Image (cartoon, rainbow, N blue to C red):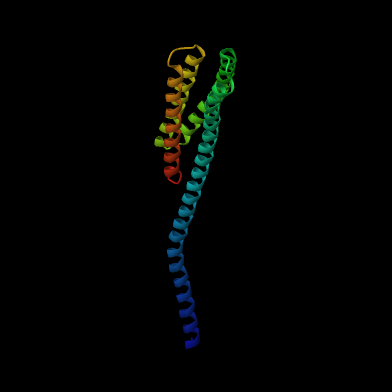
Amino acid sequence: MDSTVWVAILTGGTAILAGWVTSLGNAPAARIQAEASAKAQHHAQIREARRTTYLEFLEQAHITGELYYRLGDVYMQLTEQDEQLEKIQDLRTALRDAYDPLARCARVVLLEGPEAVAAKAEAVKHAATDANGALWYIAQGAPEARSRFDNAHQVFRDRLQSFIETARATIGSP
């Protein structure tokens, strides 16, 4: 055999060996890249699910809060006690209707997590329960019922703000 054949064999063998060594290095790199991509996609899906869940919860809390604000309108717009009581009963009915979606959304937040946000959502739900109960005392004409409601309403707003801050801080965490 002449030297040309040996050079061709050596060059071909070197190319095959180089390709094999390169593929050994590329396979783990490709696997690592695929895992990183899957992890990033999973993180994005979790973030989007949480964001949607938190927004739905905030929407229901907003509806509830708007109904609480209407109590002030009742006192400002109506002077007759019978008319006030009728509107307060209407508010209580609307709040009962609004409570179930709020409670459902709080349970969904519990599922989506994380635990800190779920605890804040639960605290908002409990504050709504307390404010709704305080409104019942107003409807019964109990003494100090209005200040009891005002305090419960303030707790509701504070807990809602705390939920928002906690959700904002954790929305990007896996």
Q: Is residue 100 visible?
A: no
- Tell me what residue is drawn at x 49 percent, y 12 percent: 141
- Tell me what residue is drawn at x 41 percent, y 32 percent: 119
Instruction: Where is residue 116? Give x, y as percent.
Output: 39, 36
Residue 162 versus residue 39 in the image, above or below = above
Quarter of the image that includes the C terminus: top left
Instruction: Where is residue 94? Give x, y as percent.
Output: 58, 22
Residue 54 versus residue 76 in the image, above or below = below
Residue at the extreme front: 79
Residue at the extreme left: 116
- Tell me what residue is drawn at x 44 percent, y 61 percent: 29
Instruction: Where is residue 124? Give x, y as percent.
Output: 45, 29
Name the residue nearer the viewer: 142 or 24.
142
Quadrant of residue 122 in the image?
Answer: top left
Name the residue nearer the viewer: 148 or 51.
148
- Tell me what residue is drawn at x 50 percent, y 40 percent: 50
Name the residue nearer the viewer: 72 or 2.
72
